[in-house]
Image: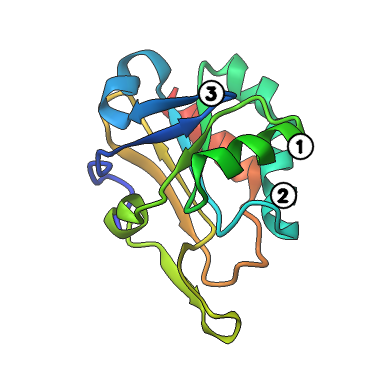
Amino acid sequence: MPETGDAAPNFTAPLANGDVDSFTLSDRLADEAPIVLAFFPGAFTSVCTTEMCAFQDRLASFDDLDANVYGVSRDSPFALNEFRDQNDLEFGLISDYNKEITDDYDVEMDFADLGVYGVAKRSVFVVDGDGQITYAWVSDDPGVEPDYDEVEAAVEDAA
């Protein structure tokens, strides 16, 4: 798993933003950093919905810091667009449908008792304009949300 001070693994993936566009992390850094990558196990689940709505509620604070928030999950971009619509999310959601980002960031987990494998652990990475990870938080418990104040403080430090 990449840690604070490591180069953020670069990736290109579909971005659900009302439409479906392509998102390449390295291409976005110059104009959008710091970037918050908030990995979550699955759209339309209770804790994931709560988490993404919490980021939405704090979006103005991130905007004030010229930071950009992106959710990342294994869901298809089409499901993520519906999830955005149903929850009035104004930030983009990155589809890691092929599990490449989850693998590169080493945040994979299984819900074997449910027959669900290879979803993202709930985790947050803040990436600065140089492509360096300035904050990393990963939970082995999918029911635990990040400390949003801590994430915001990390973004402020990276801005």
Identify the mark at residue 34; answer none if there is no mark.
Answer: none
Residue lying at 48% horizontally and 35% vertically, measured from the top left: 36
Determine the residue located farthest toward the bottom in the rendered image: 113
In-image side of 73 versus 64 (left or right): left
Give the percent coordinates (x, y) of residue 10. 25, 38
**Residue under numbered circle 1:** 87
Cα–Cα span, label 3 and label 1: 16 Å
Give the percent coordinates (x, y) of residue 116. 52, 74
- Tell me the amino acid under the disc marked 3: Asp
Residue lying at 30% horizontally and 29% vertically, measured from the top left: 24
Asked if residue 120 is positioned above or below residue 68 in the image, the reply reads below
Residue lying at 34% horizontally and 21% vertically, measured from the top left: 28
- Tell me the amino acid under the disc marked 1: Asn
Q: Give the camera-side residue of 92 and 127.
A: 92
Give the percent coordinates (x, y) of residue 135. 42, 44
Query: In which image quadrant can residue 103 be found?
Result: bottom left
Residue lying at 56% horizontally and 39% vertically, measured from the top left: 78
**Residue under numbered circle 3:** 19
Asked if residue 73 is positioned above or below residue 106 in the image, the reply reads above
Q: How crowded is mark 1: few (under 14 residues within 10 Å), some or many (20 or more)?
A: some
Looking at the rendered structure, the secondary structure element under dot 2 is: helix
Identify the mark at residue 49; answer none if there is no mark.
Answer: 2
Give the percent coordinates (x, y) of residue 89. 69, 31
Are the residues at dot 2 and dot 1 in contact (C-beta closer than 8 Å)? yes
Q: Residues within 10 Å of mark 2 (few under 14, many from 20)?
A: some
- Tell me the amino acid under the disc marked 2: Thr
Comes first in the chain, label 2 or label 1 = 2
